[in-house]
Image: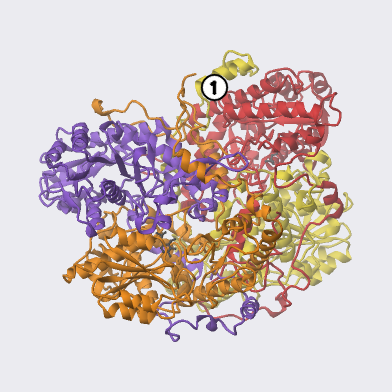
Chain colours: A yellow, B purple, C orange, D red
Amino acid sequence: MYTPHTDADREAMLEAIGVDSIDDLFHCLPDRDLPDLALPEGMTEMEALDELQFIASVNESTQELTSFLGAGAYNHYIPAAVDSLLRRGEFYTAYTPYQPEISQGTLQSIFEYQSLIAALTGMDISNASHYDGATAVAEAVNMALNRYRGRRTKCILSPRLHPQARETVHTYMMGSDLQILGEDLDPEGDPEDLISLIDEETALVIVQYPDFFGQIHDYTALGEAAHEAGAMFGVHINPIALGLLKPPSEFGADIVTGEGQPLGIPLSFGGPYLGIFATKKEYVRKMAGRLAGETVDDRGQRGYVLTLSTREQHIRRERATSNICTNQGLMMLASTIFLSLLGKEGLRELALLNYHKAHYAAEQINTIPGYLASPGKSFFNEFVVHCPRPAAEVNQMLLEYDILGGYDLSESYPGMENGLLMAVTEMNPRYEIDYLIDILAEESDA
Amino acid sequence: MYTPHTDADREAMLEAIGVDSIDDLFHCLPDRDLPDLALPEGMTEMEALDELQFIASVNESTQELTSFLGAGAYNHYIPAAVDSLLRRGEFYTAYTPYQPEISQGTLQSIFEYQSLIAALTGMDISNASHYDGATAVAEAVNMALNRYRGRRTKCILSPRLHPQARETVHTYMMGSDLQILGEDLDPEGDPEDLISLIDEETALVIVQYPDFFGQIHDYTALGEAAHEAGAMFGVHINPIALGLLKPPSEFGADIVTGEGQPLGIPLSFGGPYLGIFATKKEYVRKMAGRLAGETVDDRGQRGYVLTLSTREQHIRRERATSNICTNQGLMMLASTIFLSLLGKEGLRELALLNYHKAHYAAEQINTIPGYLASPGKSFFNEFVVHCPRPAAEVNQMLLEYDILGGYDLSESYPGMENGLLMAVTEMNPRYEIDYLIDILAEESDA
Amino acid sequence: MPEPTIFELSKPNRRGIRYPKPDVPEADLPRDFLRDDLPLPEVSEHEVIRHFTNISQYNHGVDIGFYPLGSCTMKYNPKINEDVARLPGFTSIHPLQPPETVQGALGLMYELQEWLAEVSGFEAVSLQPAAGAHGELTGVLIIRAYHRNRGDEKRTKMLIPDSAHGTNPATSAMSGMEVVELPSDERGNVDLEALKTECDDTLAGIMITNPNTLGLFDENIVEVCQLVHDVGGLVYGDGANMNALLGKCKPALTGIDVMHFNLHKTFSTPHGGGGPGSGPVGVVSELAELLPGPVVVRTEEGDEETPPFYDFHYPEHTIGRVKAFHGHFGMFVRALTYLITLGKDGLRDVAENAVLNANYLRALIKDTYHVPYDRLCMHEFVAEGEWEDAPDIQALDISKRMMDFGFHPPTNYFPLIVHEALMIEPTETETKETLDAVAEAMLQIAEEAHEDPEKLKTAPHKTPFGRLDEVKAAKDLILTTSLPEDYGEA
Amino acid sequence: MPEPTIFELSKPNRRGIRYPKPDVPEADLPRDFLRDDLPLPEVSEHEVIRHFTNISQYNHGVDIGFYPLGSCTMKYNPKINEDVARLPGFTSIHPLQPPETVQGALGLMYELQEWLAEVSGFEAVSLQPAAGAHGELTGVLIIRAYHRNRGDEKRTKMLIPDSAHGTNPATSAMSGMEVVELPSDERGNVDLEALKTECDDTLAGIMITNPNTLGLFDENIVEVCQLVHDVGGLVYGDGANMNALLGKCKPALTGIDVMHFNLHKTFSTPHGGGGPGSGPVGVVSELAELLPGPVVVRTEEGDEETPPFYDFHYPEHTIGRVKAFHGHFGMFVRALTYLITLGKDGLRDVAENAVLNANYLRALIKDTYHVPYDRLCMHEFVAEGEWEDAPDIQALDISKRMMDFGFHPPTNYFPLIVHEALMIEPTETETKETLDAVAEAMLQIAEEAHEDPEKLKTAPHKTPFGRLDEVKAAKDLILTTSLPEDYGEA
Ligand SMILES: Cc1ncc(COP(=O)(O)O)c(C=O)c1O
Ligand SMILES: Cc1ncc(COP(=O)(O)O)c(C=O)c1O
């Protein structure tokens, strides 16, 4: 299909190689009589498009459904300029910028991304991305363990750190003797509950901000407690919230991780997303992932290169800070463009819009008998609703009205059968919220 | 919305200009107190998208409907590569390449387009496009009249030249004393019927190939008759048909015009399309429109420039060959990419696919009592069906089954109430044709 | 390194796209009509992408940098417009579908007609014309039909100021009019005395551009129109410069009878490397029934429950269609998106900032480049690209040298009434920083013109191509290429 | 002219996008949590577009020219894949939607699992891993879990050939394995004797790349696997080089137990300037229940009337998830589009032409550039970028000079076992003409290396940037920029 050779080309090439047939090139294979693959014949482009259009149409997307699903992936507006730039072949058909002279487009965007993430989080430095928020958390644990070179073997994860991020940490750490604490604390408790778990063996304490329930906490005391015990303090963020909220650096974070999907990346059924990873300059040599640094070329022009590669697998091999190689380049670029478009005011405006809409929705829900939304808690654009019956049932009922109600918390917190986690963004016009309320009210009457 | 100035910018700029306020810049306007426009406030991008998505969704597109509509605009597959290149800002945010040193992208594509059209039509040269097929025909008449400098004042249009092209010629020629003949001949007659109209006053004879009814004729005799009388001979083409059929140069065409829409340009409710215009080299100075020519730069590199501008309005003003300025640049580029992708074999394959499908459809229709499809005529991908009742009624009936039946010929040929013009392309899988047949058969039984 | 042509890349049997095998029985082919040779190039999809990607990089565009091409309004083309225009509900509708299946499209056209009417003050609008010049043709034919319909056959004289764009006289000639050129006065306005002497009963009308191509608003516009009207003539407005007037002045209220809009200038639809444009025409009520058809009308108002209904309508005395179908619909989608995004305040903002930018740049360079007609300008201004004490230097040299700074040159040699014209239209979407950088470059170039003229004469230096030999092109007339003679022979 | 950073373009109050005013009452803000400063740049949409468009042109990409980056399979990225991946039915679905609302997506993932399984011979596939290295981590953890679940805690030794990619040892270390390097023999295969001495009851397994990073198919692969299996170890296959084997060899049949695919190499999903990749993992049946969850299963077969039903499934002894959600779905869409477009013959065609291209280019240059291991190669080969009689020249110099010819250089300095390695992978989508041009350039460069070494040492000359100072970058460690101190002060 995409192979250009004519028969004459092939003849001439085989002759230059000095073999008689293509088959001769494959003599070294053990099984020369592999039967044909049990796969269909190829399709033309127009047939494939037809097929894939059909498959896509089978899905009910958030364009057809009213969605209040969040729980780590958020339905945000993506300005048209973002994709119009991502579609440039110069960006998406390049690879890791190993050769800086012909990769300044990618390198400058990495440098700008690092700068934007530093500005947003209040941290000194950022790497060029991890696979997603969850793996960024796992890499944070990895980094903390490496920092203490095995001298500290405990890590404390808030029960309100994203459940899938916690699960990912467990998987990544399967081969180590790390002890993971904190997850079975009361999920509806206080952040300070974690303090009692911190000791001299603790390498890292990680919380989420806003937490998995959407709530905003002051982590100052917790951060101090971690530091007092000589441990590192990690904060996992939603970057949109930082348009409004003070940055985690103000709680003394040593590592900031986050899921960058809200920054101009489509939901896409869960990926590709963007793992944000920022830290203090002193840890730069412990950090995993690519890093662009400013320099000059031999003509005196400012330019950028990948730097400190000695941390990385292709140089350091089994002593590398991580095995990561390919990262989330294009998603990083998307978020760089997104943050450039929004800027200072735009991100604040977006955060406020999310905030007000979520609060309106929560307030309205609280008018419905039997429903209780995030009582007495500060939250951002997501909140827990205590329903009068299992969240699964509420979701099922709402789906009949083409509404994705939210995340059924019992899937991650067995005790919370009636807990529904709902997110509201700028993509939910008021009438959608009011529609939801009407239905909840009606059904609660019935 | 898209204006970048900050208040501070504006202040500084006004000061540099030496005025106190923006208003001072508009002192020269007669009515300084124009009331606010009676228009709504601006929308944000996300609101506008929402609004336009809604408007688009109100249309029933050929993705939802089964379409056999042609009549000058055809539903063809557009390879993904076409739009992926058209979306490049370097192409679509440039303008007419007046400054060749920084416009070689556009100029080389024009040169390649001219070459492709010449190869396709068999003519010596092509211009860089007209607005559409209809205006290209009008410009052909214009050129013929200019060639004879008023000494010939008749033009013969085949009744099976696209009715809207003929109407356009009438409008364009409103201010001249041209006599237009031929249109009221029997639309179902022979091309040779036109011969009797040709005389020493005839400047141009224009036929369509395949004609408006989709039929293929041998125009050799007609072309000879025109030439014998010293007149020019024009052929209006469907470029896809030329993948299969011999080029109009073989009938002795002096001018070839055509609607280029089938070459990778979306239906888009009628525009923007592409006016093809090709002719013999001897007429190059009479031809309207932009023209790219090969040359070299002062470093010895091959390059291209707009040439023979002395024909054009910006140099020659009221003595120009036409008033055309902006043409169909991006559509020309689309067709250049399209023809490059298909090439020799691809265009033939596409033409054959259209041919076979249309013939299958016609044959099947002929099995239905009362329906008669293009009896005994050679045709390409479009044909006339004589229905047992008015075509308008048949269309109305088919629409209830989500089928766009075709073009009701009585709209242009008052005597042909029962005539339905149907097109079949590669976008109509067999099951669509069979579905049409089933319904026609069922309804004809009923 | 110049890129080979697509023909030079060709090799037998390569393909960039394939089609499915026929799913129907094959029919007999029309043997007498088959072509034996189709000498098109054969390349793979990959090669096509590389070829056009590479040559695209030889282009300057608004997305690349400053593009002050006077009279062309090279403003930013918002990306949302491009996305919206590609919605299948817009791209995949056939122009001849029954109205009930395309109410979205018809409603959109109706809205656009209404917005354009409100912005300009005209009573009725036809969206059909394909570009500015096509709008002119439409408008002048309307004027012609107006007089004819009144039995006034002798009115064939069309007055055209000497500052007019070339399309104006070309259009008039094409419409069978006799063109009479009018001089400009010392303030850049139409010379009223000259106008008066031409005002007689053979006058069909005047084609006027306001602001004119000097970027100056004609201070006597009302009087000009009045004079023409007084003798029974009509006033055609070339709306190319509407960007200066949005929300500030409605041309119809100044006395203009018929005018075209350029959606590809004022309303941000992209210039596409030379088109497509879109040139809707607005007219006062007396001319509404002459518009080319079809226009869109609302035949049912609609209410809470039922949506309105839109349909096509042929004006009673229509001059007829000026092209196939209904105009450049794809451009209507973009223009309406732009309009609703801006809204009334945004539109005024466009005019204000366009005029501000032009005056600012003018202020920065006018002590170095002579700008005739010492008045505030509107959205553009025309400077002279020549100095007595730099005798070798022409406007073109300055233009070519500007490329070395990453800027597209201004329009050259137009309008004709300014020597060595540099016609500069920054547009409202440029920043002050860009304008400052442009001014700085132009001042440096002026210095070089005096001290190192060779640098200009041999410019550009930093572009991938140097000056191209236009004389050679016109002499050789190599207008096509083709596959080599021995193509396909191994 | 280097482009300013986006921070340098910033000016107070500029905006690239606006949001609607709240349509709900405003709530009280969490006063204690508000940030006072958000030092992000402020730029207009137009500036953003220009900025990124301009810097993009400083990149080489597959769409620009030849990109023979060994081990990375920089093949053409079909444009249809990009369109399909952007269908709203794919981009606008939430990963936590109930399965009944996303049957299209689940069905697509199921199909992709099946295609990958058939191509490779593995029993089960998990699509979750985000890239090759992530797939390795997944696979090695599966091996670890396999031994552990059998109570075999002492198996922590992982053998890694000296030709392996850096991610292999890094992965093993990250998984708590002890890495033991294996030498290669004189034909580029794993040294069997060395392997045998390491085969004991502490052996967890071996990580092998086949074809290996020399582009050579390990002629003893079956024996290698057998030896490892015989002592109870498992074989991990690094599937980075699968492009050579499509339709030609199923890795599972050679004895490999677990392997990752690189959708961004073999299956044409774009490399994105460094990612996202996608690294699904295939396993033999004994390991199927260890795969990270969820995988997609078909829970109802479906028939003429009802479609099948797909659901997520957590393998019984899953090692757990390796990331949030279900993997890089956007890449699955592209890869499946590619697969169904190619079909079984097209897949074999890929392998055949990839291997043909590599051998052809190798044949053209091997008399000039020493290619160790004199065997036919598979999809790539490794040449030495050094000559005794050109002592100053290193592989990097050759690479930089290649840029002047418009080509991306090969991979440098990998694999480590070849001196001054130039690892060249042309891929199947390149034409013979391109390969001829590359060979010609490389031969010229070799000549220059001997006759005018300075030309290489100071290369590249024709690119917009010259050699960048990496030492300075590592010393200065300027990793971010920010708004200037006095930002916003007028
Ligand atoms: C003043 C003026 N009038 C008319 C035109 C013609 O418009 P178009 O090129 O859209 O046909 C132009 C175009 O550049 C112009 O500048
Ligand atoms: C042989 C080999 N193994 C593993 C990898 C790692 O794959 P990824 O970059 O997708 O993580 C690479 C990548 O370049 C490779 O070439």
- The vertical placement of D356 against A375, above or below, is above
- Does residue A178 appear to the left or right of B272 in the view shown? right
- Does residue B165 appear to the left or right of A301 in the view shown? left
Q: Position of residue D197 (x, y in %)?
A: 84, 22
- The vertical placement of B155 against C453, above or below, is above
Disc 1, SS: helix
Q: Which image quadrant shows ligand 1?
A: bottom left
- Does residue C347 appear to the left or right of B239 in the view shown? right
Q: Residues within 10 Å of mark 1 (few under 14, many from 20)?
A: some
Q: Position of residue B265 (x, y in %)?
A: 39, 47
User: In the image, what residue type sits under mark 1?
Assistant: Asp
Closer to the camera in the image, A307 or B205: B205
From the image, tell me which residue sits under label 1: A9
Let me know if residue A331 appears in the view.
no
Mark 1 CB within 8 Å of ligand 2:
no
Closer to the camera in the image, D268 or D259: D268
